[in-house]
Image (cartoon, rainbow, N blue to C red):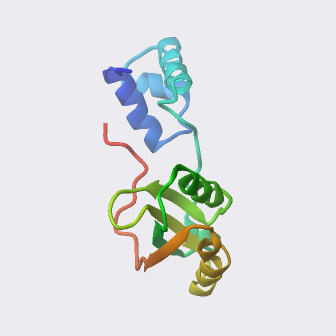
Amino acid sequence: MSIDKFDKEILRRLQKDGKKQNKDLADEIGLSQSPCSRRVKHLEDTNIIREYVALVEPAAVGFPISIYANVALDKQTKESVKHFEDAIMNYPEVMECYLVTGKYDYILRIVAQSIDSYQTFLMDKLTLIEGVKNIQTTITMKPVKYSTSIPL
């Protein structure tokens, strides 16, 4: 699906402020309210805009540690991949999970309250998923750049 300059501008502005009122959005991009509202609805209906969320500061709610875990499976069959992915969906600590190429099969971003809580997650959940062969963990020191905005 192609999007034009007005759609891109709507997306730029909503990525910065998802609560922006239609009137303000229309005024800022130079459209009247009805066409602006129709465009936003179309972007939502076509899943270009997937959802609206509040971005929460993890440390402020007790999750100051971000961890990346590279996970290798013992085999990469359709069944083993599905089993791993289904298991990961049940763990709210896992914020992101990507199937990747290379030495590992997945990269996970995990939030934790402490190193001890991560160790518990690792030992009581992640290592117990059938088919997990190897896990390499990287604990982050500080965020340098974090963005949720797609560069349009």
Relative to residue 90, is residue 121 depicted above or below? below
Q: Quadrant of residue 143?
A: bottom left
Decide which of 19, 130 is in the foreground and name it: 130
Quadrant of the snapshot with the N terminus = top left
Q: Position of residue 34 (x, y in %)?
A: 53, 12
Residue drawn at x 61%, y 87% as measured from the top left: 116
Whole-percent x and y of residue 95?
A: 55, 60
Q: Does 18 sit above or below residue 64?
A: above
Q: Nearer the viewer, residue 135 or 29?
A: 135
Q: Residue at x 62, y 78 (%)?
A: 113
Let me know if residue 59 appears in the view: no
Residue 99 location, x and y as percent? 44, 55
Name the side, left or right, on which 50 lies relative to 99: right
Side (left or right) of 90 relative to 26 = right
Label count reads 0
- Taking depth in this image into account, of 9 and 50 the one nearest to the observer is 50
Vertical placement of 96 versus 139: above or below? above
